[in-house]
Image: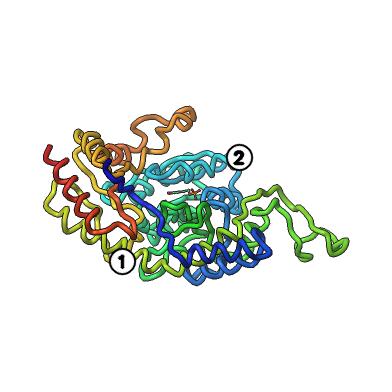
Amino acid sequence: MIEYIPYGRQDINKSDIDAVIEVLRSDFLTQGPAIEVFEQAICDQTGARFAVALSSATAGLHLACLGLGVGVGDYVWTSPNTFVASANCARYCGANIDFIDIEIDTGNLCIDSLKKKLESAEKNNCLPKIIIPVHYSGRSCDMQALSFLAEKYGFFILEDAAHAIGATYQGHAVGLCKYSKATIFSFHPVKIITTGEGGAITTNDEALYRKLIRLRSHGITRAQTDMTHVSDGGWYYQQLELGFNYRMTDIQAALGCSQLLRINEFVAKRRALAIRYRVELANLNVDLMRADADQESAWHLFVIQVDETKRKLIYEQLRSAGIGVNVHYIPVYLQPYYLKLGFNIGHCPVAEKYYHRVLSLPIFPSLNDQDFNYVIHSLSNALVN
Ligand SMILES: *Cc1c(COP(=O)(O)O)cnc(C)c1O
């Protein structure tokens, strides 16, 4: 049997395991001290003032939309080149969703398409309340250009950085929220660091932070300053709004703290693999992502584009060679659920073209030389067939 090389996988070492065991032996499995330690570590990593640890990035997207007041009748725009969660969050809030076309050489949302879309939305009185840029593959969107438009048209920016913890933009960590209201990270095992399942929001807005903390746990507060009247006693709490149980456990947070200590090593290894890929693939018939000087990707994905008439064959050939290549992403609005909302083929032509050409190659910290060379060798073979 051929050994299977996935496109991404977690890297768990003995300190990660020891950190989890320590919590299992402690008094708190959830709602204990590890959560705040992890949140502080995320603040240190990103430079943001506040962090809220959550059960997933999907929960984070949902809460951030609610926290920014998204509701029925509002418009939320995102990229079609993403996982469905980036769009579903708007639907959870009863809002309308729309998609901005992408740039073919980065997979990120296209500022020129966005400008045109904003101009026509302004005329039709349906400007978005929030735009959710997705830092596809771990590479930041053009946040400065986006924030310029946010000022002009009055929308909030919510960064979907599920791929991008450890990335930098203009010399700052993604998650600093210099140009946005909040940033969402995912700690699913396939992402840069993992907590099993898990996510976090960073923000510099204290009122938003306090609201997110409440919404994470049923809308409940124990802070006298938030209560409608003087507390009945030590046992007393108030539910101020309709919240959820979107908490992270201490078991997960301890793993997260341990993983965060290793983030520089993880990203450095991914970056080294990306550089090697770029060298090895330079003479093959594939298109690589544009390289920009003002940022460094976290390299969650290493994507190539190939001739769209050959993509399926290349995919199948690599899969049967035991290489877990993948396709990121099917344009979200082509999902049956979104087609039922009225979207059609052709809505974002570049995203559709991209979808037909893209392949994600294996990239993860423990990918060894032998497997890397095997991927290059198998891909070269597949491309000439
Ligand atoms: C993985 C992912 C999510 C969802 O993350 P979960 O932690 O699994 O909820 C959201 N957006 C993007 C772009 C993702 O890749």
For the image shown, how many numbered marks are present on the structure? 2
Colour logic: rainbow
Residue 216 appears left or right of 183? right
Name the residue at 43% across, 32% down: 335
User: Does the closest atom of ligand 1 sit within 8 Å of the Cβ of label 1?
Assistant: no
Circle 2 is placed at which residue position? 72
Circle 1 is placed at which residue position? 294
Three-letter amino acid code of the residue under disc 2:
Val
Residue 123 appears left or right of 348? right
**Residue 198 against residue 310 in the figure, above or below:** below
Q: Secondary structure at mark 2?
A: loop
Three-letter amino acid code of the residue under disc 1:
Asp
Query: Is residue 238 or residue 177 the one in the foreground?
Result: 238
Residue 235 appears in the rendering:
yes
Name the residue at 79% across, 58% down: 237
Q: Position of residue 295 (x, y in %)?
A: 32, 64
Binning the other alpha carbons within 10 Å of mark 2 as few (below 14), some (14 to 19) or many (20 upward) gives few
The quarter of the rendered structure image containing the C terminus is: top left
Binning the other alpha carbons within 10 Å of mark 1 as few (below 14), some (14 to 19) or many (20 upward) gives few
Query: Is residue 15 or residue 225 the one in the foreground?
Result: 15
